[in-house]
Structure formats: C-alpha cells, structure tokens
Amino acid sequence: MSKKKNKPFRPKARRPRGFEDKPAELLRAERKLIDAAFSVYDMHGFEPLQTPAFEFADALGKFLPDEDRPNVGVFALQDDDDQWLSLRYDLTAPLARFVAENYDALAKPYRRYQAGSVYRNEKPGPGRFREFVQCDADSVGAAGPAADAEMIMLAAEVMRAAGLKDGQYAVRVNNRKLLDGILESSGVPNTDEGALQRLQVLRAIDKLDRLGAEGVEALLGEGREDESGDYTNGAGLGTAGIKAVLGFTTASDADRGTTIATLEKLVGTSARGLEGCKELTTIDSILTATGFGPDRVSYDTSIVRGLGYYTGPVFEAELLADIRDKKGRPVRIGSIGGGGRYDDLVSRFRGQTVPATGFSFGVSRFLSALQRMDALEQSVKPPVIICAFDRSLMGDYFKMAEELRAANIRAEVFVGSGNVTKQMKYADRRNAQIAVLMGEDELAKGEVTLKDLYLGAEAAKAIQSNEEWKSSRPAQETVSREGFVGAVKAMLS
Amino acid sequence: MSKKKNKPFRPKARRPRGFEDKPAELLRAERKLIDAAFSVYDMHGFEPLQTPAFEFADALGKFLPDEDRPNVGVFALQDDDDQWLSLRYDLTAPLARFVAENYDALAKPYRRYQAGSVYRNEKPGPGRFREFVQCDADSVGAAGPAADAEMIMLAAEVMRAAGLKDGQYAVRVNNRKLLDGILESSGVPNTDEGALQRLQVLRAIDKLDRLGAEGVEALLGEGREDESGDYTNGAGLGTAGIKAVLGFTTASDADRGTTIATLEKLVGTSARGLEGCKELTTIDSILTATGFGPDRVSYDTSIVRGLGYYTGPVFEAELLADIRDKKGRPVRIGSIGGGGRYDDLVSRFRGQTVPATGFSFGVSRFLSALQRMDALEQSVKPPVIICAFDRSLMGDYFKMAEELRAANIRAEVFVGSGNVTKQMKYADRRNAQIAVLMGEDELAKGEVTLKDLYLGAEAAKAIQSNEEWKSSRPAQETVSREGFVGAVKAMLS
C-alpha cells in the first residue's frame, strides 16, 4: 500500500486545533466534580443516561436535509448508506431524540442526568475547545413550577457538592413570561408577530452594562446612533413600555417576595406576566420551605441570557469569590452554567408539546473557575518510589510496594532504566516525597533506607558545600525492613 | 431556510446503526468498574491522561494521506483546512502521539491510564457496537520484564477490584520470543524474511481447537486440504520443527517453573528463545515474591492472539465462572482484555524504539461478562417517592424529601402531573418500595402515610376480592410526621 517503501512516512506528532490532552491533576478534579454532581442527582431520584456520540444530523436539528454539506458548527460525516451523522453539540438534542424514541416506555416525569463530551466545529481559542465536557440534568414531562424549583435547588446543591461554601455562589432566577407580559401590557402581542420586537428588547437589555440606562432607553424606543455613526433600529416601544422594561431590569430585591410584588405591578393585566409571577411565588414557597435562602437563590431580572431560548423560569449559576489575578485586579468568575424550562423539547419529533426543565453546567468552565478560586484540592498524593537499586531484588521491591499499598499508601517500584541518580531524578519529577532504597547489604541486615526528598531539597538549599552535603546525608533515615511501612507513614505525616 | 414552511420537517427519532443508549443500571456498573480500575492504577503510581476524540488521520496510522477517502474501519472527516481527522479507534495510537509530542517533558517511565469511547466504522452486530469503552494502562520507557510483571499483576488486581473472587479469573501469560526462538531453532530466520512463515505458524496454532493436533501438524508442514476441497498452504516446517511447535502448544503446566523448564528445552540454542525464557523467569520471581500464585497468573503457551502484534511477553485476562445459560448450556465467558510488550509504539513518529508495555480491557465486554456471572450488584436503590397529594403543600413535600436525603435515603417529590393513582403507577414503574402520602388533614394531625409497594404487590396477589383489598389496606402505615424518617428507614430494612 505504501508508495515509498524505502523511506517510511513519518507523521508529525501533533493534535488538531482546539483539541486538548487533559493532564492528570485536572482529570482527577474533573472526575471528582462529576461524581459529586452525579451523587446529588442520584440522591434526588434521577437516573443516569448515556447517549452515543453520533446522532443522525436531521435528528440533531442543526442540519438541513436537502443540502450537501452539514451546517457550520457541527462535526458531520456521511455514513456508508449516505446518511449524514453528526457528533452531538450538546446533551439536550440527544435527550430529545431519546425521549421521542422511547416515549411510551418511559415513566414520566423522566428525570435523567448525563455528562459527556460535546463537539463544536468552531474556531478554537484560549480556553475555547472544539471538544468539551458538559453535565446536564433534566426533567421531562414535568409541567409545574415545582419541577423548576427542583432544578434550581439541584444547581445550588451541586455548587455545595463541588466544595463551595454558601456565599461563594448564587443561583439567579428570572422568568421569560415576565418580560413577555410586560411587553404584552405595552402593546407587543404575545405571538409570533411580536417576536422581532421581543428580540430587539432582549438585545437592548443585554447592553445595559455597556450603554447604561440612557442608551438602552434609546434602543427600546426609536433607535440609537453610536459613536461610529452606525444606527441601530429601536424596538419601537412607547414611553410607558420603555419605563416598564427599564423598571423590570431593576426590579430585583434581595428579598424574593419583594421582587415578586414589584413584578406584579409591572406586568399589569397580562395573563402571561401574571402566570410568570405565580410561578415565581410557587418556586419561592418551595425554596423557603426547604431552607434555600436568598444567599443561595435570588430572583434577578437582569438575567437575560436564555430568555429567548427558554419558555418559562430561567436561571444561571454564578461563582462569586472575591479573588484577584496576579496583578491584583479583581477576577470575574461569572456563570458556570444555567438552565430553565423549555417546553418544546420533543415537539420537533412528535409534533406535540412535552414540558421539560433542566440544568446544564460546563465542566471545564466550572473547574477552571474552581482553580482560579483556589478551591481545587489535590486528591491524590505523589507515590512513594521504591528504587530498583539491585535488579536481582525486584521481587523484594514489589513486595515492599504491596505492603505500602496495603497500608493505603500510593507506591511504585521504578521499572524504567538507569542508575540510582537517574531514579532520584525521576522521583523528583514525580514530586515524590519519599524514595526507598535497599541493596544486598541492607537486605542481609534487615534494613531499608528512606530518603525524604522534600526535606532533602530544603536542606540542599541551606547547605553550601558539597562536602558537607555528602557527609551530613540530610533527610535520610535507615529503618528496619519489618517496620518500614510505619516509618514511611511517619515520614509522610 | 426551510423549503416547506407550512409543513415542518419532522425527523424520525432513531439512532444510527451500532450506537447505543446506555441504560441507568449499566452506566452505574460501568462507572463502578472504571473507578475500581482507576483506583488500582492510582495506588500503583500511574497517572490519568485524557486525549481528545479526534486525532489527525495520519497520526493514527490507519490512513493513507494521498487518498481521497479515509481507510475503512475509521470514522474520518475533513477539517476546514482540508486535513483529515479521525476519531480514535483505540487508546494506544493516541498515547503514541501524546508520548511522541511530549517526549522530553515526560518523566520516564511514563505510566498512564485512560478510559474512554473508541470508534470503529465497522458493520455492527449483536453486542458489537461502533462506539464502545476501553480502559487502558501503559508503561512507556520501561524496558525490563519487571514492567511486564507489573502490568500482569495490575490485570489480576483489576479483576479483584471488579469484585471477582480468586478462581473466577485467570491471567494467562505467553511470550512471543518463545515461538520466535523455537522457529529460529527450526530454521525460520528471526528477521523479516521469516515473517510469512511465522504468520502461517501462528494461524495454524490458532486452529488447534477446531482441527486438532493432526490438522495443525499438516498446516505446519506441507499444507492441508479441507472437506470442501480447499487447499491451505503449509508453513513448510520440517519434522523436528513441527514437533517443537506442537510441543510448545502443550508446554503449559500449572507450575510456572515447570513450564519454563520445558520451554528452555524447546527453544534450543536460539538467543531470542532463551531471552523469552529468562523474561518469564524474572516475571515468575516477582509474581512469587508478591504472592501472585498460579491460580491468579499462569503461563499458558496456547495464548496465541496478540503474538503477532506484541514484541515480548503477552497475556490475556479471562473470566472462568462455571455458569450456564437459560437452557443449561455452559456459557463461555472468555477473554475480557489483554496486553503485552510493544516496543515499537512511538517509532513511527520518532524513528526510534521506545519500550512500552500495557494492559487494555473492554469495559462493555467486562460488564456483560460480570452480568452473565451474576456478579453485577445494583449499587443504588430506587428512590422513596413523596406523592404530590395536595399541590399547595409542595414546600412540605420537598422538605420531607430533604430530610430523607439527609438520612442518606434516596428520595424525590413527584413533580409530574396526574392524580395519586397515576403517581402510584409512576412509583411502581420506578420500582420504588415506599410511597409517602400526606394531605391537609394529615398535616393538621401531624401524620404521614407510608405505603410499602413491595408488600402491597405481594398482598394484592393473595387477596381475591376488591372489597377486601380496600378494607384491609395492606402494607400501609400511618406514622407521625416527626418520626417519619425513622419509620421509612425501618420499612426499607
């Protein structure tokens, strides 16, 4: 098969852009985080599900079946029967397919959790990968706000399970129906007809941070010319509508009940708006009964992202730590996930509305936030390294390693090549604290030598002369072979 | 964008062939198995690694860069810069790429473990998927047989960690160098020149079960005509060679030392064969020192699979349970994984040999074997279901669920729609043992009703008349709200 038989093809060892090799420390933290979340979901009666990496492109919904090429943003390929397959770009679309495929067999509400890689065929950047891990929980077939309250509480519980203290995170809740209602009361019909105006309002609110109230006011009304002279059409609301929308963005109070009272006034007589208020009232009563105070879950009308996608309550989970970067500037941690109600999940397959609500977080995003908050603990210590001092004694070395492991101490025999100096260098690179040495002589005497490499490194800094170093042999201890496990334990502690 | 705006496209909810949705029970068992293996690897000083799903096709090595279409067997697609990307088909090829890419930065031996989905674009069948999970551990940069001994012991330790008892599994070890040596002594040069003959010999031995010694003898010599008249060319060994090879296939003894002694005679003066014997001797001494008896690890020259791929010691992990299928026929469990030494891992990238040895097992294969052996425990019990008897009391119900979870009892509030009858049906489908009921009246009285659905189902079988059923209210208990967690606990036990 090879064209150049005499000069073998030698590929360059490299990764495709936007794909990463995850290092050990991160992987252990990732496993711990996912385990913590899974255990929360398990305890709440959710069941795990794992859908495959591939779905039919048309089932994922980002594909137009009459085109030759799959849509941008998705990794797709043609199967041998010419059908397009896509790698999942999230865990929600496959859930929709799964529920539609197994609708009658599932006891409803069907509450499942899943974590796994998702794939985005997009331009990668720093911290922006084309393969990353999400962790989702969803309730399908659960119409009432109690199911939303449950998802909100789960989000807060996952934060705790990840090791965060109350006060280091907040779940902020909004409801799409509120803004819909306010707009309805301001003359924007709550139908497809009003869709463009609603979108313009959402976009305007989203710019509050950047443009301030005045700029947003213009965008809600006639429109606005920016500094470069570009003109953005406004949403065309009247004075009362603009006032109501701006009032909405500042309606949040630390007390959830007070916020609801403000919102009730703003939505006026809109049935949809009042429904939104009623849902928040029910959610509040459940949160209050179960002790989820406003420090953990607050009502925040400035949460806009997702208002276009979700159909009812919507929320974000944010990390709040007061931390600084290396230059002392405050670090924005921001949202690590969110969720809400989306009642049109399965409708593309079945043509019928199935109520659903869920919570999704970005595992890598969460981990890097924890990392920046110094909240990532190293769960596994470096191993004790047993040097292969005398190759004829390998059996003895492996037995010693077994004894350490039986005492729950991570341990390995050096199985590479090289003399003791090289082995010490290896122990150092593994960040090991202890190296164990035993030769023929020591074996005969029933002795073992332990080197404390941490202490040794410190001592080495202090000691000037090489002579002195050699004669003093710091951080080294000869112990009996019988009692060596205990001696290792003592040295580690 | 849509061509038929009035009639929306409604995709069929279905999966691509060979891809599965994994159910809850299996997923929990899978997580447990992988955790158990990971913990063994951690304790032995290995570090986790996660490589991405995609690699450059040329780096994976199953792709010819000058062809238009990727090779059969691999899922591949073209990136936007026209380079071919492939989904990994195993975890070894990506490891090779990773080691080559980071060679100098890695402390050697580099010992890593990894579990993850691999993808094969092959014809699926029953139990044969196009996406499945493998779990690998490898030592790279470890030349001596001590590293092989370590992998063999790890394989046995993983079997134990998976919950198997000694005697329910065996790790069977062979060494490619033995057969190479025997053939060398029989005139087959230990170079590329002898490659075809060695392959023919391997294929012949592999048919021992099916053809018996006589058929294999023919295949080792001149050749053989089968019943259909098809003729297979033989390996062309002489009488002494045939005798030596047949002697090799039956050289195994329960005692590892005895097997080695037999093999030493068979390999004659071949340096390669003697090297193989020496390696087995070293491995045996380590296994013996650490107490890995012949019941856990045996030397078995009938292990042929992998002899062509691996370059030194090779082994398989087999499950041995004496079990029967539903019709009473003995069930072959067989191999769930294997490994060995492969010293040419990184050479395609670096042009230099890097010694490596590893162990890989098929997670799904292992799980289905455990399932057939009835060795899969259900790790999570069904939840207690708190019925939403009165929607105005949802806060109270969620508080009750919280109290149960605080006592480590899995619990959920019914968040779907439907009356109590429907909720009972849901509890039943969730296989829940207990349903909790509390209405306004009970709340006022400080009482809660517990239904034992398991007992109820049994009682229902016994009771004939519907009247009797209603009046006796079997398997139902009214307890105080205060003490209800204790009452649930008592009912569960």
Image: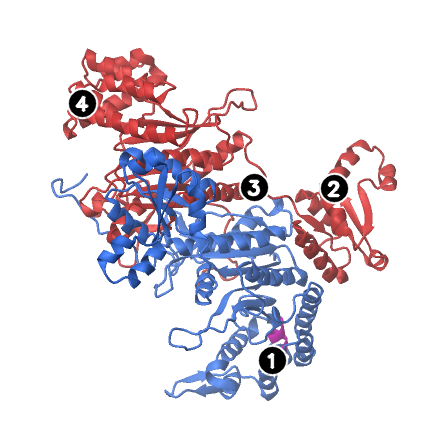
Chain colours: A blue, B red
Q: Position of residue A19 (x, y in %)?
A: 34, 56
Q: Real-space Cα distance between discs 2 and 1? A: 49 Å
Left or right of residue B92, residue A87 in this image = right
Which circle's residue, 4 or 2, is located before the other in the chain? 4
Kindly report which numbered mark, 4 or 2, lies closer to the viewer in this rendering. Answer: 4
Do marks 2 and 1 share a chain?
Answer: no
Residues shaded magenta: A177-182
Q: Which labelled disc corresponds to residue A248?
A: 1
Q: Quadrant of the N terminus of chain B?
A: bottom left
Task: Indicate the amino acid at tag 2.
Answer: Leu
Check disc 2 and report its element: helix, strand or loop.
helix
Check disc 3 and report its element: helix, strand or loop.
helix
Q: Chain of mark 1?
A: A
Q: Badge 2: how crowded within 10 Å, few (<14), some, or many (20+)?
A: many
For the point 34% across and 65% down, which residue is it? A125
Task: Indicate the amino acid at tag 1.
Answer: Phe
Kindly report which numbered mark, 2 or 1, lies closer to the viewer in this rendering. Answer: 2
Residue placed under numbered mark 4 in the picture: B270
Task: Indicate the amino acid at tag 4.
Answer: Ser
The answer to whether the residues at label 3 and label 4 have Cβ atoms under 8 Å apart is no
Residue placed under numbered mark 2 in the picture: B453
Q: Main secondary structure of the magenta part?
A: helix
Q: Nearer the viewer, residue B326 or A256?
A: A256
Q: Real-space Cα distance between discs 2 and 3? A: 21 Å
Which circle's residue, 2 or 3, is located before the other in the chain? 3
Q: Quadrant of the C terminus of chain B?
A: top right
Residue placed under numbered mark 3 in the picture: B25
Can residue A80 be spotted in the picture?
Answer: no
Check disc 1 and report its element: helix, strand or loop.
helix
